[in-house]
Structures are given as structure tokens and as C-alpha cells.
Amino acid sequence: MNNKVLIIEDDENISKALEVRLNARGYQISTAFDAVMGIQKALNTPPDAILLDITMPGGNGLTLAERLKASTKTQDVPIIFLTASKQPELRQKAMALGGTAFFEKPYDFNYLLAALRASIEHPNVCLSL
Amino acid sequence: MQNPGATTPIKVLLVEDDEDDAIITQALLDQSSGQRFELEWARSFDAGLTRIKEHNHDIGLLDFNLGAKTGIDFLREAHLDQQQTPIIMLTGQGNESLVIQALESGAIDYIPKRNISAENLQRAIFQGMDKIRLQAELTAYQRQLENTNKVLKQRTDEIQRFYHLLAHELKTPLTAASEFVNILLEGIPGSLNSEQTDYLHLIQGCCGHLDRNINDLYEITRLETGKLSLTQQPADVGPLVTDVLNYLAPKAQAKNITLDTCLAPNLPYVMMDVQRIRQVLLNLVGNALKFTQKAGTIFVVVGEDPLCPGRVRVAIQDTGIGIPQDQLNGIFERLYQVEQDPSATSPGLGLGLFICRELIKLHEGTISLTSTEGQGSTFSFTLRCAG
């Protein structure tokens, strides 16, 4: 069965690119372009992993991650953070919220893919990338 | 000091309960040539306190014995209200310990009555007024400096916020562009011919170049606004060098450049922020790759610095184009560009080596360069050993 990945990313181009590349590798993708849509989709159909942008309209990714970790439906879903921001403290905050990996944009897709695979196989392991 | 020839009278408040002493003080001030004094006499502690709080006087002269209370009590009560009039203590006690007590309580000077003369009274008044004026000026300068610092801090924060935003706004479309190039290169929408593939690799290289420039601009802002701090810990620099060379190996292979290392055995740990030293190594070895022709060699030597005990030296030697002697001095300066053939490789922003120098300085290390034009360059930096 194909793993389900929810991409919560406000930049539609990056979201589309991730969708295309992950689809090509057999992942089943759903997308959300803001925090509210993201949490609705995550709660309606909990995915196997979430790729979560940090800076988004309607609440930032860190707050959204807190909400997801507080719900019994999504608390065990691994979250991989993405950000175009270079604020050094973001990585620490994201990982403290239970993120399994953190990538600065532009990310290396092969590393991202490896982190996604590892997160789905071992959802409770923190990846130092 | 107050100009003795000034015509504006100096207003003096005398707090004195002894009539004879008050008359003598008035007489001493009358003897002054060139400077007029207007003396107001407060005959009691309470009368003096009321008048000093009105701030109508240039200076106060204060007797020590004031009925049941003392001049020290007066100073304490007067200064509770933060009055600004300078006060000189006059006393017949002759007790030196009073000097310290009076000065600690806020008097600006002290004259024993037995030594008083027109000359030293006048001098003390002028000096006291000058002291207060200088203190007021100093306070004003301090406030001005505090305000300037506040404005500078606000400006620094604004610049920092702007660069955060700029990095975000540039990196987002850059990521999308780079990702769609990768989608095409992976052949997801269909296969490509070799020319199309070559062009896409060129775009990919440009995206990488843009990303490095954005990072450099961001780093420079953090360095110059003092926001960049290190997380140093004892670590082995050898494996880091190997890791960086492995990372850059595909680029070296593409130019048929030999990458090699010589790591001294039993290298001591150094104090470093691993990510930052990795950044320095990527920059220096990356530059060496950029400026070394095909089939050249880059050799990274790591060992204890024989000239500087307690330090490890990392040297990156290349067989590249080298740098003219007259341009070696400026190479680590901000925005410096080596003059070169305009058709040669893009010179970049001139920030990379400056960032390297600043990062090494933050590590309390040194960075240097030797080069012979046409033969190659050696960039080296030192890090202090841990422990």
C-alpha cells in the first residue's frame, strides 16, 4: 500500500514540485495551502507523514505542529519541517515540538526522501539533518 | 571654571545659625573682585531646607552645626528630593572624619572655617559650580548615548528582520525553480535529449550559485549586526575535513582535479562550532576548485601548528591560477574583488573570504594566504586546541 503524505505548504509551486516528485516514487499525496486547511485534512484523514512549512498564512507551522501533536488522531504522525527562513532558533523549536527532521529550502530532495522513509518506518526517531 | 570677570551675580544660599559667621561669610564674598555674589541667609535648618528645594540658588554654603540637627542631616534630607544646587560644607569642628561623611552625603566640597579666606571660598564656589555643570553635561551625554544606542539597536533589528524576509522571499521561488529543474532532469514528464539535460544542469548550477549568494548576504548581516554567535565544543577537525572533501568530490571529479589530505596522527581536539568550520572549509576548498584548472591538485594538510603551540593549522593548497602579490593584502576584506581577466570565472560577491575570516576570528583563530601567480595558493587557518 502506498504511504500517504500530507504536504502543508503555502507556496503552490513548491507544493506541486514535491507532489510530482513524491508521486513519481509511489507516495499518495494530499496538499493544503494554509494552516487551517492543513489541520482539517490531517484530522479527517491522518496521513503516514506530514511535510510542514513553517511560515504560512493563518498560523505558523510550529503552532500547527503543536495542535497536531495534541490530537490523539495525529500525535504519532511524523512531521518533517521545511522552511525558507534562516532564523537559527527555528530548528531547535521545531525539533522540540516533536519534529522528526528539519530542512532549509532549497532542500536536497534525496535527503528529504531519506528522512521521509525513515520517519514513516520509525516515527519516533529524531533525524539530525 | 566660572569666569571671575562675569557680571552676572552668583546667587549663594548660606544656611547658618550663627549670626557672626554669617556676617563674616558675607564679608569674605564682598572682598571678591570681578565677581558679584548675592548672598541669601537662611538662619535655621528648616528655613534652609525650604529655600534649597526652590532651586533658586547657584550654590549653597552649609554650616555643620544647625541647632539640634547637623549639616549632614540637611544634606540627606535635601538630596532625598534630588535637589540640584551644589552645596559646600563649612564647619568649625576640624574633624577630618566629617569630610568623608559630608561628601558621601552629597556635599561637593568642604572648607574648615578656621582656614576660610575670600580666595579659597571663591575658588570652592567656582569649582563646585563647574563640577555640577560638568556632571549635568555628562548626564546629558549619557542620555544622548543611550538614545543613540536605542536607535541603533532598533535599526539593527530592522535590518535583521529585512534580511530574514529577503532570504525567505528569495529562497522560496528559488526552491521551486530548482525543484522543477530536478523534475525535468528525472524525466518525470518525459525523456530529454542530451542538450536539454545539459541546459538544465546549467540552470541547476545557477540556482546553487544564487543560493550561496543569498546565504552569504544573510551571513554578512548577522556578522555585522553582531547576531552571529558560535556553539563551540571540543571536536576533531580531521573527520570534518574528510567529510567536506567527500562532499565536494563529485565537483572535483567533474574537473579531473585530485583532492587529497594529509592528516597528522593523534590530532588534538580543537574548540570549534562544527557547522561554522564546515562552512569555512566548504568555502575555501570550493574556491580552490573554482580557481584550479582541469587535472590540477588540491591538498588539505592538517596538523599541530609548529609556530604556534596549542593550535591546529588547516592548510588548503591548490595548483590554481594564484593571486598577484599586490592583491594578497586585500583578499579577506569585505567586497574585495581580485582583478582578473573579465572573461574568467564569475568573481562572486566578494563576501566569502570575508565571512571565513570573521568566522575564524570568532573562533580566536587566524587565517592567512600565500600565493604565487600561475602556480597556486595556500589558504590556512588555525584553531585553538581544546583543554
Image (tube, grey):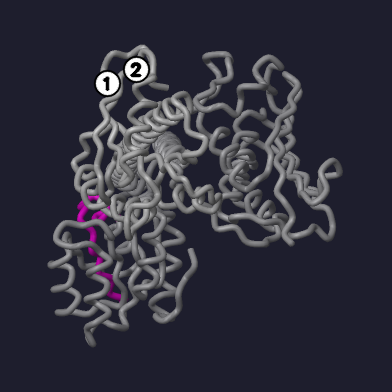
Q: Position of residue A71 (x, y in %)?
A: 22, 83
Q: Is the residue at mark 1 from the same chain as the one at mark 2?
A: yes
Residues in magenta, as a range? A2-17
Which chain is disc 2 placed on? Answer: B
Q: Quadrant of the N terminus of chain B?
A: top left
Which residue in the structure is indicated by mark 2?
A: B35
Based on the picture, tell me whether residue B341 belongs to the magenta stretch.
no
Secondary structure beneath label 1: loop
Give the chain of mark 1: B
Along the line of sight, which residue is nearer the eye, B38 or B85? Answer: B38
Q: Quadrant of the C terminus of chain B?
A: bottom right
Quadrant hosting residue A26: bottom left
Tag 1: amino acid = Pro
Q: Residue at x 13, y 73 (%)?
A: A40
- Quadrant of the image occupied by residue A33: bottom left
Viewed as shown, does residue A1 lie left or right of B105? left
**Left or right of B241 on screen, residue B132:** left
In the picture, the disc for residue B9 is 1
